[in-house]
Image (cartoon, helix red, strand yellow):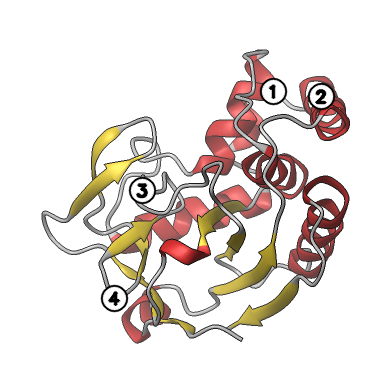
């Protein structure tokens, strides 16, 4: 078990929020063809069943957008990662190929619509708290440079903020040196499908990242 909790003030703004946390050893791979085939199938299904106007009204996406508004953040400007990924799929844009760990969480986001953080556990310093970004707070976001995280839901450890549903920080990103990951599936409205998303994630970690003993738990 890891030391992770949701802050009281975030719970006050989002009373039904919870996290699906998974801690797992992994074997890093730059590319896994079988995993990518599954991603392509998911993308094709999305392209054939969704249009741009429907994405914001998908239940999990809508709950995420409502949480952003409750915290005072504009969801169209600071779009959550799951919504951004679904929009790329619907538009026929290429889904970025990163590595097997990140590609797994992208697959889960495509299937279940949750925004998901994937962090190099050995770069974290417990305790970890899911909280709210402070005024003028920022970090180096992956592929975005300096990102304003004020009023976003953010993960913090003893060093500082390192992740959000919009974009995670470079400090805890997955690299070829990563041996253990913390995956956080962010559920703003206690969705019935969270356990299914967690089960699929664990299955993918075993299948595509040689995970031996993944641990999963829900944090309320």
- Whether the residues at callouts 2 and 1 have beta carbons within 8 Å, the answer is no
Please give the residue where the numbered disc 1 appears in the rendered image.
Answer: 51
Q: Which residue is mark 4?
A: 158
Q: Nearer the viewer, residue 116 or 88?
A: 116
Q: Earlier in the sequence, mark 2 or mark 4?
A: 2
Alpha carbon distance from label 2 to label 1 = 17 Å
Tell me: 98 left or right of 64: right
Q: Earlier in the sequence, mark 2 or mark 1?
A: 2
Q: Position of residue 167 (x, y in %)?
A: 41, 44
Q: Callout 2: few (<14), some (14-19), or many (20+) C-alpha neighbours within 10 Å?
A: some
Residue 87 image label:
none
Closer to the camera in the image, 153 or 27: 27
- Residue occupying the point 40% across, 56% down: 163
* Residue mark closest to the camera, 2 vs 1: 2
Label 4 to label 1, Cα distance in Å? Answer: 42 Å
Query: What distance separates the C-alpha of mark 3 from that of mark 2?
Result: 27 Å
Instruction: Answer few, some or many: residues within 10 Å of disc 4's Cα (few below 14, many 20 plus, some between 14 and 19).
Output: few
* Circles 3, 1 touching at the beta carbon (< 8 Å): no
Which residue lies under the disc numbered 3?
169
Q: Which residue is mark 2?
A: 40
Looking at the image, which residue is at 64% across and 54% down? 60
Q: Quadrant of the C terminus?
A: bottom right
- Residue at the location (60% across, 22% down)? 88
- Mark 1 lies on a secondary structure that is loop
Label 2: which secondary element? helix
């Amino acid at each position: 078990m890891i030391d992770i909790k949701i802050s009281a003030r975030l719970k006050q703004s989002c009373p039904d929020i919870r996290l699906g946390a998974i801690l797992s050893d992994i074997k890093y791979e730059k590319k896994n063809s079988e995993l990518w085939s599954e991603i392509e199938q998911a993308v094709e299904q999305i392209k054939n069943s969704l249009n741009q106007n429907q994405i914001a009204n998908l239940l999990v996406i809508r709950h995420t957008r409502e949480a952003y508004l409750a915290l005072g953040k504009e969801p169209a400007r600071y779009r959550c990662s799951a919504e951004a990924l679904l929009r790329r799929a619907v538009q026929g844009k290429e889904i970025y190929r990163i590595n097997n760990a990140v590609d797994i969480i992208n697959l889960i986001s495509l299937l279940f619509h949750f925004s998901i953080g994937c962090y190099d556990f050995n770069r974290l310093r417990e305790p970890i708290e899911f909280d709210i970004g402070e005024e003028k707070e920022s970090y180096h976001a992956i592929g975005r440079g300096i990102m304003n995280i004020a009023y976003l839901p953010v993960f913090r450890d003893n060093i500082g903020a390192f992740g959000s549903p919009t974009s995670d920080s470079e400090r805890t990103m997955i690299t070829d040196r990563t041996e253990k990951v913390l995956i956080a599936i962010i559920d703003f409205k206690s969705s019935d499908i969270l356990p299914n998303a967690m089960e699929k994630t664990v299955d993918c970690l075993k299948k595509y990242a040689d995970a031996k003993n993944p641990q999963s738990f829900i944090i309320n």
